[in-house]
Amino acid sequence: MSVESNNNAITVNNVTKIYKLYEKPIDRLKEALSPTHKNYHKDFYALNGISFDVKKGQTVGIIGTNGSGKSTILKIITGVLTPTAGDLKVRGVISALLELGAGFNMDYTGIENIYMNGTMMGFSRKEMDAKLDDILEFADIGDFVYQPVKTYSSGMFVRLAFALAINVEPEILIVDEALSVGDVFFQAKCYRRMDEIRQKGTTVLMVTHDMGAIIKYCDQVVVLNKGNFIAQGEPGKMVDLYKKILANQMDDLSEELNDFSGEQAVSRKEVQAAEHKGLMKEKLTVNPARTEYGDKKAEIVDFGLLDERGNVTNLLLKGEYFSIKERIHFHGEIEAPIFTYTIKDKRGADLTGTNTMYEASDVKAVKKGDEYEVEFKQKMTLQGGEYLLSMSCTGFEGGEHVVYHRLYDIVNITVISNKNTVGVYDMEPEVSLKLSRAGE
């Protein structure tokens, strides 16, 4: 249970949000008119007894899979929604940037929306006059500010909305994924400004899927899953926890949640047992629309993507070592099988990859019933982002290249980074500096 304290900017105590789901629209009327008060609905728990604290001056991130209740708890904190049960305390003036359109009148001009929202936040016309130049300079949308916001692109809209939210000197700033709409330059500008106001004591509560931003900017992170509170703690440890949730390893977390160290992972024994049971791929998010082909003389019966700590996961940290594992069963004799993997970007361009022939690996001839376990271990130097993994078993017969089994774009790889450089990958430079001052 959350403990109320004068040092808390936000105290969320056992908050539950239930929605009534009806199979047919008529069921709502039937329930309202039922003399016996018969229920025609099912209860959906968007939030189920959530409790956590946000200390004054902290930057706190909320992470979780889609449908975990992240946006719902933000709307309750900002007063957009009312909880079904539980209570919360907010100490400070909130400036919130939720989904596009919240709090804006689409028929008003940008200027009119600035003054209207300022009034709603409790600022006088004179106070908003003093803030206007900073807001317009930050938004940088030119004369569009005099046009109705319904004519704005999504990028212009978020620029104005964020400029307003961040320049009214809020005591608490709440941001829900809005920065994902702006271009990379505007995102960088927003994060710099968030750093500035955080150093002045503003409390920031943010929801984002950008794990790099979570690690870089947050003091604390709250993890939610399917409407339930999972844990609150230091960013790196919570991102590790989130990775296990994405890898469908919640059962493995039961002993870790009371004191999650972030260094704990699926043990090597568990991983090896999973490999032999063919369970590695069951712990991954696998492409349901994958393409696979080949004559199946060899078959990839299991595969895994493992991080440096041995977790089977789709999420990898830039700069850490990771492994791609394949288990191949042979349905016939093959003289010289070749095992491969390729990583592509979302547009389908090959970024990197290798195979056992390139690596001059000592692969033996196989007969029917044999199995090979192959592991490619390497350092993740790709920039933070989304990638696709393909793998195959091929060979040469009579001088012709033969595909025995290829899994095309079988799983996604999400690379988390708190330092992206230019281009596709990081050359990991070592920087040295020497300053010679004038007159010295």
Image (cartoon, rainbow, N blue to C red):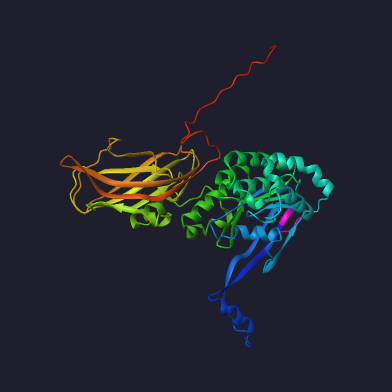
- Determine whether, in the image, residue 92 is placed left or right of residue 386: right
Residue 284 picture location, percent across and down: 42, 54
- Asked which quadrant contains residue 141, the reply is top right
Q: Is residue 38 visible in this depiction of the protein? A: yes
Magenta stretch: includes residue 274: no
Say above or below: 77 vs 35.
Answer: above
Magenta stretch: includes residue 8: yes
Q: Residue at x 58, y 42 (%)?
A: 183
Residue 88 picture location, percent across and down: 72, 61
Number of numbered discs visible in the structure rendering: 0
Q: Residue at x 48, y 60 (%)?
A: 251
- Asked which quadrant contains residue 18, the reply is bottom right
Residue stretch rendered in magenta on the structure: 3-10
Q: Main secondary structure of the magenta part?
A: loop
Residue 415 picture location, percent across and down: 48, 44
- Quarter holding the C terminus is top right
- Residue farthest top in this picture: 439
Say above or below: 148 vs 27.
Answer: above
- Determine whether, in the image, residue 372 is placed left or right of residue 166: left
- Asked which quadrant contains residue 38, the reply is bottom right
Q: Residue at x 71, y 43 (%)?
A: 198
- Quarter holding the N terminus is bottom right
Front residue of 82 and 168 = 168
